[in-house]
Image (tube, helix red, strand yellow):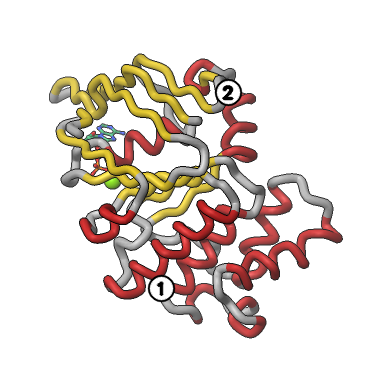
Amino acid sequence: MLVVKNLTKSFTSHSGTIMALDNVSMTIETGQFASIIGKSGSGKSTLLSMLGALDVPTSGSIEVDDIDIATLSATKQTSYRAHKIGFVFQHYNLIPNLSALENVTLALEFGGMPARLRQERAEQLLRDVGLNDDEQRRRPSRLSGGQQQRVSIARALANRPAIILADEPTGNLDSETGKKIFDLLHSLSRSENTTILAVTHDMDIAGKTDKTFRLKDGKITT
Ligand SMILES: Nc1ncnc2c1ncn2[C@@H]1O[C@H](COP(=O)(O)OP(=O)(O)O)[C@@H](O)[C@H]1O
Ligand SMILES: [Mg+2]
């Protein structure tokens, strides 16, 4: 279970202080598929960064299975990111000169999987997200946007994370492909009991998730 309490994040610059997150509280059950909606600048990416321990909150707590990740040491935060979190980004963030398969085996290597086990696991993950043997051996530039996002989802799943954080995963895709990517995330949250939190602009998609949070000026409004 993911429990966020009174989470605040402010950024200070020469032009003043911005409250990117203002007293946000939310709960997501293990295995739930939740969406976040809100206008540009409302704090969606900041919230995902905090949940993924990519940045530190100004105040408040983030409990993942009863451990407050906001107060972990830097070393433990790195370990939390590597073992508990999978990230999916709008621009896929694949390594361009590695094949789809190598992008996934690299993630498995970072996760500490022995070399002899990586290839088979990566092939299975890529098959699960819908890439055939030929496609698995192509570089990202020779795959469609939807296929690249499938690779990035396989990579996010590589080390069996408890939570997948997806920041506008369909932002660069046409709406038909975007729906398929969301369906894929949905079925994964069911089959792997993975908690998924995804930012989206598509109200159709948000309406189909288990729970929707709306952010406005750093505050949750629903
Ligand atoms: N590193 C940063 N430094 C200063 N301001 C930031 C930083 N990151 C985000 N912000 C500000 O915080 C607010 C929320 O940003 P963000 O979380 O990126 O919104 P969203 O993802 O909903 O578009 C915006 O006003 C943005 O300019
Ligand atoms: Mg954003």
Frontmost residue, 136 versus 193: 193
What quarter of the picture does the C terminus occupy?
A: top left
Question: Ligand 1 lies in which image quarter?
Answer: top left
Question: Is the residue marked 2 within 8 Å of ligand 1, measured from its CB?
Answer: no
Q: Is residue 35 above or below residue 140?
A: above
Any mark on residue 74, and which?
A: 2
Q: Secondary structure at mark 2?
A: helix
Residue 140 in the image, given as x and y percentages of width and height? 51, 73
Which label was assigned to residue 79?
Answer: none
In the picture, residue 127 is in which quadrant?
Answer: bottom right
| Between discs 1 and 2, the one toward the N terminus | 2
Report the mark closest to the observer, 1 or 2.
1
Instruction: Tell me which residue sits at (39%, 29%) in the image.
Output: 27
Residue placed furthest toward the bottom? 134
Mark 1 C-beta to ligand 2 under 8 Å: no
How many other residues sit within 10 Å of disc 2, few (<14), some (14-19) or many (≥20)? Answer: few
Q: Position of residue 214 (x, y in %)?
A: 22, 39
Tell me if 168 is positioned left or right of 160 in this view: left
Tell me which amino acid carries mark 2: Ala
Tell me the residue that label 1 is attached to.
Answer: 145
For marks 1 and 2, give the CA distance.
34 Å
Residue lying furthest right in this view? Answer: 116
Other-residue count near label 1 (Cα within 10 Å), few / some / many at <14 / 14–19 / ≥20: some
Q: Amino acid at mark 1?
A: Gly
| In-image side of 58 versus 54 (left or right) | left
24 relative to 212, above or below = above
Residue occupying image coordinates x 41% and y 66% = 181
Q: Measuring from the top left, give residue 191's x and y in whole percent.
A: 58, 56
Q: Is residue 199 left or right of residue 141?
A: left
Residue 95 drawn at (x, y percent): 55, 63
Residue found 46% across the figure and 58% down from its top: 185
Observer-nearest of 183 and 13: 183
